[in-house]
């Protein structure tokens, strides 16, 4: 199982690239950037420039904030800049935030993502003078490449959570990108069976589908402080409004009562009250939380279920917003990749 890391929430591009270099030195396999406060593709370009060996990808770019042809062109260019190290992850983003922040109609997400992934895959693999045609319900394209791509294609992952979207990801994408609150049970019992079914229905070999899994990581030399940080991180998924992706995961795994409580408390700004209600089982099953040794043991539980575990670091009490905050993570990467 590969070990990846999520970047893009840091205060400066310099901090991001410094972290990327240190993570690569520690043995990280992949560095992912995200459309959240920064452009995932621009940040990916900076990370590519700062590294030499690690794969670099987006996890994810928001399909509702982008157009598939230009996204495909950006992916081709990033793959060229990186010497063939690039992975493109695409998703719907937060459907509620799409409406709230951008005024975008987020309906018909299944048709949207089918067309988006199919067009992007055609663009990233299009050879010089080869015609690319697609007429879909949500998107269309008529285009031909000016030159050959540096590699025949590149991996295109689709982020998904609900059964129908997971099946679609298995049908059209190269991998099912699973979000930052994903238990072993969720990946094994819900994601994998639906993705495999989608691949088989499309006549694809299920073995060709990758299962990268992002995981909330709260690592601290003080295990109690690590758990406190996880509680806070879990609750913030419900502010300013519940994130439908993660709310769905919690409910599918049987935590409806907490999801209902957080949905009421967090939009009202009642963080302390919500934190007090987070079930210990949610922390233990849906995050990687504890000391370095405890987190290393949790990572091993994903072996055989996920192809890659992407660590999304949770801020800790006493953070300085510098690379020093990541020392425990670097030690964990070094231990997990031995």
Image (cartoon, rainbow, N blue to C red):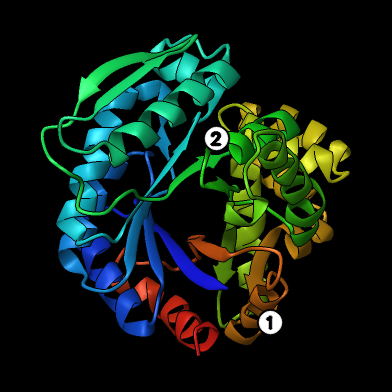
Q: Is residue 266 above or below residue 218?
A: above
Quarter of the rendering containing residue 40: top left
Q: Nearer the viewer, residue 223 or 26?
A: 26
Q: In the image, is 303 to the left or to the right of 60? A: right
- Residue highlighted by disc 1: 297
* Residue at 46 percent of width and 11 percent of height: 138
* Residue at 19 percent of width and 62 percent of height: 83
Instruction: Point out the frontmost of discs 1 and 2.
Output: 2
Dot placed on the residue nearer the N-terminal end, 1 or 2: 2
Q: Nearer the viewer, residue 207 or 13?
A: 207
The label on residue 138 is none
* Residue at 71 percent of width and 29 percent of height: 164
Q: In the image, is 118 to the left or to the right of 288? A: left
Q: Is residue 137 above or below residue 328?
A: above
Q: For the N terminus, which image quadrant? A: bottom right
Q: In the image, is 218 to the left or to the right of 261? A: left
> Residue 327 placed where, x, y %?
40, 80
- Residue highlighted by disc 2: 172
Q: Determine if residue 166 is in view.
A: yes
Q: In what element is the residue under mark 1?
A: helix
Q: Nearer the viewer, residue 185 or 285?
A: 185
> Residue 5 placed where, x, y %?
44, 64
Real-space CA distance between mark 1 and mark 2, rounded to the nearest whole angstrom:
34 Å
Which residue lies most toward the left here?
Answer: 146
Q: In what element is the residue under mark 2?
A: helix
Q: Is residue 93 above or below residue 36?
A: above
> Residue 46 placed where, x, y %?
18, 55
> Residue 238 placed where, x, y %?
63, 35
Q: In the image, is 3 to the left or to the right of 16? A: right
């Amino acid at each position: 199982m590969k070990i990846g890391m999520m970047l893009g929430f840091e205060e400066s591009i310099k901090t991001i690239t410094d972290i990327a270099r240190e993570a690569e030195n520690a043995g990280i396999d992949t560095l992912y950037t995200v459309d959240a406060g920064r452009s995932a593709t621009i940040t990916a370009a900076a990370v590519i420039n700062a590294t030499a060996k690690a794969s670099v990808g987006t996890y994810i770019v928001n399909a509702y904030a982008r157009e598939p042809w230009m996204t495909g062109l950006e992916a081709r260019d990033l793959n060229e800049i990186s010497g063939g190290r690039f992975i493109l992850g695409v998703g719907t983003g937060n459907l509620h935030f799409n409406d709230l922040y951008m005024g975008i109609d987020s309906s018909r997400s299944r048709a949207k993502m089918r067309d988006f992934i199919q067009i992007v895959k055609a663009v990233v693999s299009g050879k010089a003078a080869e015609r690319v045609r697609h007429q879909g319900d949500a998107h269309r394209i008529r285009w031909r490449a000016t030159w050959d791509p540096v590699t025949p294609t590149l991996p295109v992952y689709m982020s998904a959570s609900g059964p129908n979207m997971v099946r679609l990801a298995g049908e059209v994408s190269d991998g099912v990108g699973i979000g930052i609150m994903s238990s072993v049970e969720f990946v094994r019992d819900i994601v994998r069976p639906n993705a495999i079914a989608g691949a088989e229905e499309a006549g694809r070999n299920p073995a060709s589908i990758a299962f990268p899994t992002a995981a909330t990581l709260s690592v601290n030399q003080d295990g109690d402080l690590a758990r406190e940080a996880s509680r806070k991180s879990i609750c913030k998924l419900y502010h300013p409004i519940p994130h439908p992706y993660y709310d769905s995961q919690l409910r599918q795994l049987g935590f409806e009562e907490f999801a209902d409580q957080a949905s009421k408390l967090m939009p009202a700004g009642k963080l302390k009250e919500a934190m007090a209600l987070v079930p210990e089982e949610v922390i233990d099953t849906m995050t990687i939380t504890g000391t370095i040794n405890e987190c290393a043991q949790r990572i091993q539980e994903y072996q055989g279920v996920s192809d890659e575990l992407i660590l999304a670091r949770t801020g800790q009490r006493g953070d300085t917003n510098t690379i020093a905050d990541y020392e425990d993570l670097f030690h964990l990467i070094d231990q997990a990749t031995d």
